[in-house]
Amino acid sequence: MPSSASAASASARRTHSRRQSTCLASKLECALRAQLRAQKQPRIPLATTYDAYSNVALVAAPPTTRLALPCTLQRPALREVDMASLADAYPTLAGVPAQYIRDRLPGSCATMRAALAAVRPISSLPKSSLPKEVQIFINAAVAAACPTHMLAVYGDVPFGQKRPVSLFPIHDLVFRTHCAALPALPPSLSAGSSSAHATLPVISLRLPSPETFALLHAYLYTHNLAVLAPPCDGDLLQLVAHAHKIHGLWRNACALGVVDERLYDAVEEAWARTLGAMEACS
């Protein structure tokens, strides 16, 4: 039976741990409030910007208003992608293991990434509603590996506010082999396009963190997660922003059922390092 001194020592350690946690949470809350005050949050729900990765017109999303920080990011139960639907789209891949394809995609994706960076829509996109398809110009880079679909990524917004939407051109082979929970993709129309333009079906995709989807989009082509390393000299505000980036990527990966153990390993490590840096700042 533990002595009264041991019990008192254990109680003191628990009290100290709770105080540290409360202190860090309080400082994070203050940092978030300061960050929000610094952001003027203009009410321009349909301001147009351009994504540096895809060069497709985007609608600017409103700034984040609150960030919850769990101690750990739970790894989801992974399930394999549906190889039957992949074989329907790519008959030559019938019988090829999905992991074999995933392991070899990054080495052959340079041409795809160059095509994504060269995508230009032929006409401006309507701001009131999403079209069912969008036409893009065909140039040498796009012709070498023409995207197959355009994802229209959006998230939840308060009732009465306009919903910002971001457009990302993709190659269905990359997303079909990585995302077990990807919505069904219609057949690509680009194969029947003229030499001057291609027509891409637009797929609506609701995600928990649309503002960080560009990170996951890039990772599926490169398998490079160096961007998740926390800033070496970051202050608490920078670390809060970095935590939001990691948390958003993890939420999107879980929502899409991304099948990649290395991704979740990197996310867990980056999350632990970022929280550790926050503790050091406190």
Image (spheres, rainbow, N blue to C red):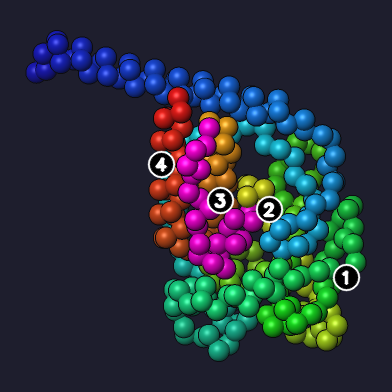
In the picture of the structure, the residue carrying the numbered disc 4 is 272
Q: Contact (CB < 8 A) between labels 2 and 3?
A: no
In the picture of the structure, the residue carrying the numbered disc 1 is 122
Q: For the residues marked 3 and 4, what is the alpha-carbon distance in whole angstroms?
A: 15 Å
Q: Which residues are magenta?
A: 213-235
Residue 151 seen in this snapshot:
no
59 horizontally vs 236: left or right: right
Return the disc, 3 or 4, that comes first in the chain's sequence.
Answer: 3
Q: Is residue 269 magenta?
A: no
Q: Element under label 3?
A: helix
**What's the residue at 75%, 44% (across, down)?**
61
Return the disc, 2 or 1, that comes first in the chain's sequence.
Answer: 1
Q: For the residues marked 1 and 4, what is the alpha-carbon distance in whole angstroms?
A: 44 Å
How far across and how far down the image is residue 98, in percent?
A: 47, 75
23 horizontally vs 131: left or right: left
Residue 12 seen in this snapshot:
yes
Disc 3 versus disc 4: nearer the observer: 4
**Which amino acid lies under the numbered mark 3 shown in the image of this protein?**
Leu
How far across and how far down the image is residue 109, in percent?
A: 58, 75
In the picture of the structure, the residue carrying the numbered disc 3 is 249
**What's the residue at 46%, 67% (across, down)?**
80
Return the disc, 2 or 3, that comes first in the chain's sequence.
Answer: 2
How far across and how far down the image is residue 22, in percent?
A: 45, 20
